């Protein structure tokens, strides 16, 4: 699964960054690196960018770059689901 496929408000752990080295380095400086947790906050209209939260940082990322970032979805946060 890639980052562009992650649903709004869902979180995931970054598994791989299949991006050019300069973009990988820039994203790492912002906290987006392998094993970091990322949340999709908003999506741009049609093929617009994604607004992401990585730790305490929020950033915008082009959708074509997000499609090259492999992720592992995280389970929903504890306490958010109704127990029957």
Image (spheres, grey):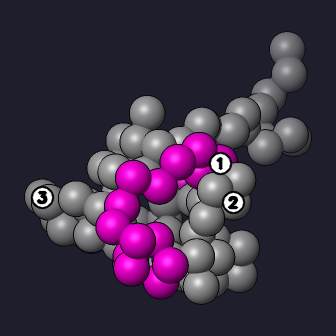
Q: In the image, which disc is placed on residue 26?
A: none
Above or below: residue 48 compared with residue 23: above
Above or below: residue 82 compared with residue 31: above
Displayed quadrant of residue 36? bottom right
- Part of the protein shown in magenta: 6-26
First in sequence: mark 3 or mark 2? 2
Left or right, 38 with reference to 6: right
Q: Nearer the viewer, residue 44 or 14?
A: 14
Q: Nearer the viewer, residue 55 or 34?
A: 34
**Where is mark 1, residue-wise?**
13
Displayed quadrant of residue 79? top right
Residues at marks 2 and 1, CA–CA distance in whole angstroms: 6 Å
- Give the percent coordinates (x, y) of residue 8: 46, 52
First in sequence: mark 1 or mark 3? 1
**Closer to the observer: label 1 or label 3?**
1
Q: Residue at x 71, y 73 (%)?
A: 55
Mark 2 and 1 residues: CB-CB less than 8 Å, in contact?
yes
**Where is mark 3, residue-wise?**
46
The kind of secondary structure element at disc 3 is loop
Mark 1 and 3 residues: CB-CB less than 8 Å, in contact?
no
Q: Residue at x 58, y 83 (%)?
A: 30
Q: Nearer the viewer, residue 8 or 56?
A: 56
Residues at marks 1 and 3, CA–CA distance in whole angstroms: 25 Å
First in sequence: mark 2 or mark 1? 1
Q: Is residue 67 magenta?
A: no
Single out the residue that lies furthest toward the left: 46
**Where is mark 2, residue-wise?**
36
Q: Residue at x 65, y 48 (%)?
A: 13
Query: Label 3 crowding class (10 Å Cα cut-off): few <14, some 14-19, many 20+?
Result: few
């Amino acid at each position: 699964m890639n980052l562009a496929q992650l649903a709004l408000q869902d979180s995931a752990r970054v598994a791989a960054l299949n991006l050019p080295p300069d973009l990988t380095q820039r994203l790492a400086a912002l906290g987006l690196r392998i094993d970091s947790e990322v949340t999709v906050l908003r999506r741009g209209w049609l093929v617009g960018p994604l607004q992401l939260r990585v730790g305490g940082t929020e950033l915008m990322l082009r959708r074509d770059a997000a499609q090259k970032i492999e992720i592992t979805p995280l389970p929903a946060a504890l306490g958010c689901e109704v127990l029957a």
